[in-house]
Image (tube, helix red, strand yellow):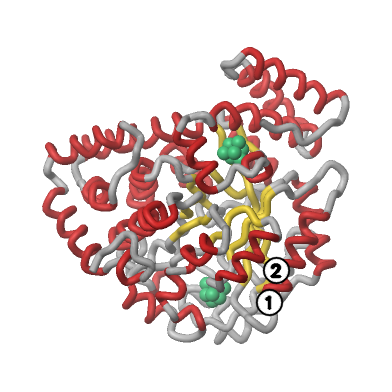
Amino acid sequence: MYDVNSKCADDFINHEEILETLAYADENKENVELIDTIIEKAKKRKGLTHREASVLLACPIEEKNQEIYKLAEQIKKDFYGNRIVMFAPLYLSNYCINGCTYCPYHAKNKHIPRKQLSQDEIRREVIALQDMGHKRLALEAGEDPVRNTMDYYLESIKTIYSIKHKNGAIRRVNINIAATTVDNYRLLKEAGIGTYILFQETYHKESYLELHPTGPKHDYNYHTEAMDRAMEGGIDDVGLGVLFGLDKYRYEFAGLLMHAEHLEAAFGVGPHTISVPRLKHADDINPEEFDNGIDDETFLKIIACIRIAVPYTGMIISTRENKSCRERALHLGISQISGGSRTSVGGYYEPEPEDESSEQFDVSDNRTLDEVVRWLMEMDYIPSFCTACYREGRTGDRFMSLCKSGQIQNCCHPNALMTLKEYLMDYASPETKAIGDKLIDKEVLNVPNEKVRNVVLENLRLIEQDNRRDFRF
Ligand code: SF4
Ligand code: SF4
């Protein structure tokens, strides 16, 4: 039976409840009166239930869809302004004992080169990432209890935080690793991780069992209840995501929101981020073999509907998507993007030879970080390298309550400008720097509080003239 508070995955991601939600959405997808009521509710910026949001997602009425897009854009602006947080993935290891049918790291793939970065290799990669200008990483690894042990992760995190190369520093390490125990989550928290990310892949249990035929990941309930254990272990920033293309997108959408509702109900804090990856070509994986692929229009509508359903949750898009799709997604709700990414194990320090590729998926956006930063600024976005909340201990419910009170705006905008200034001074090409300096001059005037504005101006001066770094609110 559906129970948002239950600790059992079958209850909080209840199959019958999802089917009823989809039936309700189908019945009401052209019910203009109801759709208007839901849109009005969404305008209050307190979010929507999975049922309400599912009605909007199913709605085929063009005029209403335009209202949904407009509202998503407005909510995005209200909560995130024109800032976009930058990050990069760092693949530690592609050893994996699971049999996921959509990922080239599955255990039966005998020809893909298997690699695990040593601490020295991590050091090289991190210096290369710092030299690009990154401050925030997402660690990625397959599941292999013998090779990819918790000790290995803890040592790697320690190594990463310890590297200070020139003015570089990785200030926030997020981690995307297999579901584990409460005790291990506690260790990750103590090691100073930011967000624990785990994609559900699909919320449809039957499909899940087929798509994960072998390995520990086959256990749907253990996987789906991982965020509960992470929270019990003290990690209060968790990142959800599904891999769109594995099952029917409307099913996944309802499941994703039910998962968010469950975390909010059970722990008082919803997901910190939601990622929206789509199935892509990779080594021995052909996305055409999966029946549930979605086109760009549907993908963008999903993003808009998530944006208005969970306004406080950051949304992430990776380099799986190409430039033009990322551009539209940014308008509709995405608040974090990766740039200059490598999806292979290693590859930042030295690109892999083509015939030895260990990539998890093909990258559709191959631009350098400098090019991505410039592109964002040309569209009037402020690329932000801010990690202040995590470093000030503003995580979990402390972060959410700040967010809900609107106070976060007083931190994010100045922090974005100061971290962008650091980037421009240390890593940008002359062309990017010129555009960025102009943008900062303009944007600093938008800091409403005069006292704060003066502090920002002074800090910008110190960054430029005194080589000072790491200012934050
Ligand atoms: S998705 Fe993750 S668990 Fe599955 S095969 Fe790939 S790396 Fe392994
Ligand atoms: S101040 Fe906090 S919420 Fe705002 S950009 Fe920085 S880390 Fe993110």
Residue 200, given in percent of the width and then of the height, sits at: 44, 66
* Cα–Cα gap, marks 1 and 2: 7 Å
In the structure shown, which secondary structural element does the residue marked by tag 1 occupy? loop
Residue 356, given in percent of the width and then of the height, sits at: 70, 74
Q: Residues within 10 Å of mark 1 (few under 14, many from 20)?
A: few
In the structure shown, which secondary structural element does the residue marked by tag 2 occupy? helix
Q: Is residue 271 above or below residue 9?
A: above
Is residue 453 visible in the rendered structure shown here? yes
Going by the numbered disc 2, the residue's amino acid type is Tyr
Going by the numbered disc 1, the residue's amino acid type is Thr
Name which residue lies at 57% across and 46% down. 395
- Name which quarter of the figure residue 90 lies in: bottom right
Q: Residues within 10 Å of mark 2 (few under 14, many from 20)?
A: some
Marking on residue 253: none
Circle 2 residue: 153
- Circles 1 and 2, Cβ within 8 Å, touching? The answer is yes
Name which residue lies at 30% across and 57% down. 254
Left or right side of 472 for 350: right
Q: Nearer the viewer, residue 472 or 298?
A: 472
- In the rendered image, the quadrant that contains the C terminus is top right
Left or right side of 179 for 200: left
Residue 95, given in percent of the width and then of the height, sits at: 64, 79
Is residue 432 visible in the rendered structure shown here? no
Tell me which image quadrant ligand 1 sits in: bottom right
- In the rendered image, the quadrant that contains the N terminus is bottom left
Ligand 1 has an atom within 8 Å of the beta carbon of the residue at disc 1: no
Circle 1 residue: 149
Left or right side of 217 for 145: right
